[in-house]
Amino acid sequence: MKAVYALGFVGLTALSARGQAALYAQCGGENWTGATTCVSGAVCTYSSEYYSQCLPAGTATTTTAAAGTTTTTATATSTCGATPPASAGKLQYAGVNIAGFDFGMDTSGDDTASSAYPPLTQYYGSDGAGQMTHFVNDDKYNIFRLPVSWQFLTNNEATGVLNETNFAEYDALVQACLTTGASCIIDIHNYARFNGDIIGQGGPSNEMFADLWSSLATYYATESKIVFGVMNEPHDLPSITIWAATVQAAVTAIRNAGATTQLILLPGDNYTSAETFVSGGSAAALATVTNPDGSFTGLIMDVHKYLDSDNSGTNSACVTNNIDDAWEPLSQWLRCNGRQALNTETGGGDVASCETYMCQQIQYQAENSDVILGYVGWAAGNFATSYVLSETPTESGTTWTDQVLVSTCMAPSVNGYVA
Ligand SMILES: *[C@@H]1O[C@H](CO)[C@@H](O)[C@H](O)[C@H]1NC(C)=O
Ligand SMILES: *[C@@H]1O[C@H](CO)[C@@H](O)[C@H](O)[C@H]1NC(C)=O
Ligand SMILES: *[C@@H]1O[C@H](CO)[C@@H](O)[C@H](O)[C@H]1NC(C)=O
């Protein structure tokens, strides 16, 4: 969850082993020095002076622009990956972010351990444990994302050595999550950074970051319901290729620590925007990340998408269901490339526009459940019930009352879209 977008340079590399650009990768545009031909079945299609993209063959239509130049754009129909299998229809996961251990984190990666605010009553926070129990029992949610800063886990050191006192507090939230029977995402909420510097690109080394993941994965190696969320919302990365090597270091460390079967979430650039995951080069770069045995088993793409006018998740009103711009091209790329994604942040205000668009987004995700595993709403935990995107329920005696968007649309018990 970010406050604003910063415009940044996005490195683009999408070469296949044969030196051809992958499906949906860039293949041309001003100053483009990468491959200009596409893999078999795809055609390099002009989008603008700045950008051409490999699109499925047989989908291009040619129009003549006002200036007399020829412009080729893609239609929605596609020969590769357009149609979900008949078995699609029910998502595997729906959940809520239980925020607090990430409080104080800035998009620059600046933070101090003392600004974390544990969402647990024993540490003077909200009743995150009670919230999760309610969400599972009453709403049929089955996954929670538990954001935490690197600084908190190590008490401000850029190392992989967990501070015992601080980690015990975070683990209390993880254990409360596991107790509900849900899956629990460990989310390092650092925007690919540590105190202003980018991991593996001027900041802490890949080895230090891998050490952090090794410590966590060693601790949770036997917990099958733990999901490893490598990093929250990288952005403005000088090189997506170098970032993919950082992600690879984390994946290798997690698997080699003995967590061999759990899901690992791979985060791309641009705040893990689902909309630019393919066009911005994140998909092609992260597609190269493998398990130590060379397989992709359990390696899931991590994407975020809000429904407000600037995809920032800071506005109450929703203006889009994200289907045409984000979920459809993403689903096609995932299907064509044999991969899957989890939408670990989405949300909106408690207003009619969000009820309409969020319900449509979830329906589309369910219709494409072969490649989209589910969604996780932002956010409950220590957020006040008055926060613009609050999913924090109100407790009164033994009764919990949900926020409107949850009770009208996002709760699996209401929408019926979760298996
Ligand atoms: C291409 O390179 C020129 C010269 O460095 C630069 O001014 C221009 O902005 C670049 N175009 C794009 C799309 O990056
Ligand atoms: C762990 O963190 C606490 C603050 O929560 C600090 O007082 C303590 O000195 C740290 N322990 C070590 C070994 O650094
Ligand atoms: C990031 O994604 C948003 C949409 O989600 C898009 O408007 C913006 O242009 C993208 N920025 C970059 C640098 O790719």
Image (cartoon, rainbow, N blue to C red):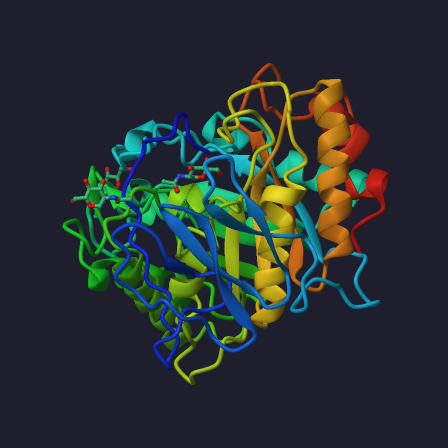
Question: In the image, residue 218 lies at what x, y percent?
Answer: 39, 67
Direction from residue 155 to residue 333 in the image, left or right? right
Q: Residue furthest bottom?
A: 293
Q: Is residue 348 above or below residue 185?
A: above
Question: In the image, residue 156 lies at what x, y percent?
Answer: 22, 41
Q: For the C terminus, which image quadrant?
A: bottom right
Q: Residue furthest left?
A: 202
How many marks overall? 0
Q: Residue at x 30, y 30 (%)?
A: 114
Name the one closer to the observer, 65 or 377. Answer: 65
Name the one closer to the observer, 262 or 161. Answer: 262
Q: Residue at x 28, y 49 (%)?
A: 163
Name the one closer to the observer, 28 or 214. Answer: 28
Residue 340 in view (yes/no) = no
Residue 394 in view (yes/no) = yes
Question: In the image, residue 165 lies at what x, y percent?
Answer: 33, 44
Ligand 2 - quadrant of the structure image: top left
Q: Residue at x 69, y 26 (%)?
A: 393
Direction from residue 115 to residue 171 in the image, left or right? right
- Residue 211 occupies quadrant: bottom left
Question: In the image, residue 358 lies at what x, y percent?
Answer: 71, 34
Q: Is residue 123 above or below residue 336?
A: above
